[in-house]
């Protein structure tokens, strides 16, 4: 498995819009992304207003194919419009799950 962990901070007053975005992505986009497994989104306890998310894919190839998809780029641009700055991304191989 492969995935990305990312940090982001919604614009003031846009926290619910970010959650709505993720609900829509799950309903509309997820069924079209073969090999996407799941995503977790955390509200940071240490840094108010900041979120940390982890997205899981079957493989690096699947994740990279999705990131190159123009439809995913369209979705990302909607997400980015709700944020103070670009998310901080950390991609990597998932080596342990239980």
Image (cartoon, rainbow, N blue to C red):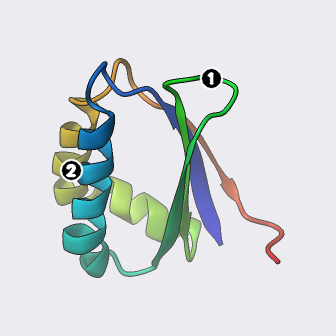
Q: Residue at x 39, y 25 (%)?
A: 86
Q: Is residue 61 left or right of residue 46?
A: left
Q: Residue at x 44, y 59 (%)?
A: 64
Circle 1 Cα neighbour tier, 10 Å, few/some/many (<14 / 14–19 / ≥20): few
Q: Secondary structure at mark 1?
A: loop
Residue bearing mark 2:
75
Q: Is residue 19 above or below residue 80?
A: below
Please provide percent x and percent y for residue 95. 81, 67
Q: Which mark is residue 4?
A: none
Q: Which mark is residue 47?
A: 1
Looking at the image, how many numbered discs can be counted on the residues? Answer: 2
Could you give the CA–CA distance between mark 1 and mark 2, rounded to whole angstroms? 26 Å
Q: Is residue 14 above or below residue 4?
A: above
Which quadrant would residue 44 be assigned to in this image? top right
Which quadrant would residue 23 be assigned to in this image? bottom left
Please provide percent x and percent y for residue 32. 25, 78
Circle 2 Cα neighbour tier, 10 Å, few/some/many (<14 / 14–19 / ≥20): some
Q: Is residue 60 above or below residue 19?
A: below
Please provide percent x and percent y for residue 2. 62, 65
Using the image as rendered, state which of residue 76 and residue 19 is in the foreground: 19
Q: Is residue 71 left or right of residue 94?
A: left
Q: Secondary structure at mark 2?
A: helix
Please provide percent x and percent y for residue 48. 56, 23
The first of marks 1 and 2 along the sequence is: 1
In the rendered view of the protein, which quadrant contains the C terminus? bottom right
Mark 1 or 2: in front is 1
Q: Residue at x 24, y 51 (%)?
A: 21
Do the residues under discs 1 and 2 have CB atoms within 8 angstroms?
no
Q: Residue at x 46, y 70 (%)?
A: 62
Q: Is residue 3 above or below residue 38?
A: above
């Amino acid at each position: 498995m492969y995935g990305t962990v990312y940090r982001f901070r919604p614009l003031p007053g846009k926290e619910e819009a970010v959650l709505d975005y993720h609900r829509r992505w799950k309903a509309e986009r997820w069924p079209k992304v073969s090999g996407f497994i799941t995503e977790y989104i955390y509200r940071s306890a240490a840094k108010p207003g900041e979120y940390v998310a982890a997205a899981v894919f079957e493989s690096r190839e699947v994740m990279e194919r999705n990131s190159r998809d123009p439809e995913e780029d369209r979705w990302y641009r909607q997400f980015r419009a709700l944020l103070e700055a670009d998310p901080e991304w950390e991609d990597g191989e998932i080596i342990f799950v239980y």
